[in-house]
Image (cartoon, rainbow, N blue to C red):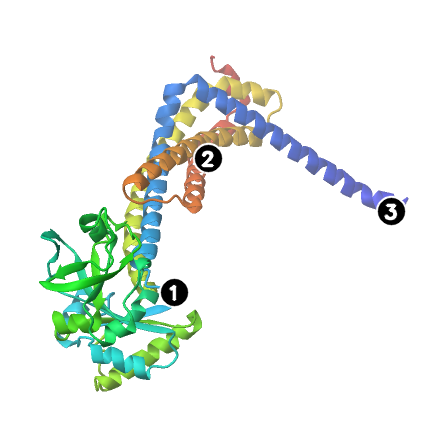
Amino acid sequence: MAAINQTHPQVVSRFVKARELAGFWGTAREAFWISLDTLRAHKLRTFLTLLGVVIATTTLIVVMSVINGMNLYVANKIANLGANTLVLSQFKWTSTQEEWLIAQRRNKAIRLDDYEFLKDNLQGFKTIAAEAGVSPQPEVKYKGRSLEQTDVGGVTPSMIDLGSETVASGRFITSTDYEHDSMVCFIGMDLVDAFFPMSDPLDKTLMIGGQPFRIIGVADRLGTIFGQSQDSFVQIPLTTLEKAFVARPHLNVNIQGFDDASMQELGDEVRTMMRSRHHLPYKENDDFGINSSEALLSVWKQLTGSIFAIAIAIVAVFMVVGGIVIMNIMLASVTERTHEIGVRKSLGARRRDILTQFLIESAVMSVLGGLIGVGLAVIIAQLVAAVFTAAVPLSAIVVGMALSTIVGLFFGIYPASKASRLSPIEALRTEI
């Protein structure tokens, strides 16, 4: 009997809590349907009320989508140096303008003998390759026809393992071509389209800077980056470039490690060997640059982060404007429904019930604005992706919806609180 008396209060407490929870969900469900009826009854007012939230949500998601698309584009197309790859060059790509000006006076160009030195002495690398360009670009011709803006560069045979090019037909430059300064070339699809639209380009002879080069291979199509074709190129052996065009070309040396864990050690070893080769005292800064995809992406994301911060400021203004409009409409709704509030209170509605009802109505309006904004943003992002680049991240949708909901709840607090504090007697005296 004593045990029953001890457990009885717990049972009663659980029953009361369950009843309160059921009452809350009943009030919430009722408030939800009332808010939808109110929105349908005043369509123009609803449109004007939601406009600020819709614009803010759309702007936020579109900006996040464009930035996300640009980040993915840069990571995959521009900063994609290959897995676990660093690049030794004359300059550090992420230098500030001041550092760049200093480096122009101080830094030494990376030469072919630097590449050979690293290739023979560096430990712990998987692949090492080098490339160099020609400036100004020599003219590329075939039977009297020429192609403008063709990139002519020299590469080592191992560049096929690190570059973005893959062989579509024929072959790439070999060690024999490299060692014998062969007059051969590997070309991009733009040259095939321009010179050999109806014939096989292999073993044909191109005139590059007035010198004959035999075509030994064609690359798969790479496409464009920001509207610039990546298929208008000619690659020749680096030794041939040094012999025919540039006596001492400036090189970029690409070095690939075996895994992520070894990259720090590999970079340190390259730095140590180059400092020793350039006879730099320990207090002197490097007179060369060691670059990686991560460093380039870091600088890029700092830039897009600044753009995003500006967008957030604009979105904040729209959100505040939208929230103020929602608050004004909710205050007007409280005034219109004062008699209804009095009736509800006289029938037993508690202050908490009235507060919950108006908060839910405010949240429903803002959430509806958020949903419309998400829909518009997805459509706009798809249109942008068709001409530029954009990718809608799930986080943008979540953030947009969360912000719109928070705005509705925050700016609905005062009208809801005002409604809940109304005296039932004074409210009932209000004319309908």
Q: Which residue is mark 1?
A: 83
Q: Position of residue 413 (x, y in %)?
A: 46, 35
Front residue of this view, candidates 361 and 426: 361
Count residues near mark 2 (Cα–Cα under 10 Å), then give few for <14, some for 14-19, many for 20+: some
Residue furthest top as drawn: 432
Q: In the rendered structure, which amino acid carries the disc numbered 3? A: Ala
Front residue of this view, candidates 102 and 423: 102
Residue at image coords 25%, 83% = 275
Identify the mark nearer the N-term, 1 or 2.
1
Q: Which residue is mark 2?
A: 413
Q: In the rendered structure, which amino acid carries the disc numbered 1? A: Ala
Residue at image coords 62%, 20% = 347
Identify the mark nearer the N-term, 3 or 2.
3
Q: Quadrant of residue 167?
A: bottom left
How many angstroms separate mark 3 from mark 2 (CA)?
46 Å
Q: Which residue is mark 3?
A: 3
Q: Position of residue 240 (x, y in %)?
A: 18, 71
Q: Is residue 26 left or right of residue 78?
A: right
Residue at image coords 24%, 72% = 177
Secondary structure, mark 3, is helix
Front residue of this view, candidates 80 and 297: 80
Q: Nearer the viewer, mark 1 or mark 2?
A: 1
Q: Position of residue 237 (x, y in %)?
A: 22, 69
Q: In the rendered structure, which amino acid carries the disc numbered 2? A: Ile
Identify the mark nearer the N-term, 1 or 3.
3
Secondary structure, mark 1, is loop
Q: Is residue 136 left or right of residue 62?
A: left
Q: Is residue 235 left or right of residue 382?
A: left
Q: Is residue 319 visible?
A: no
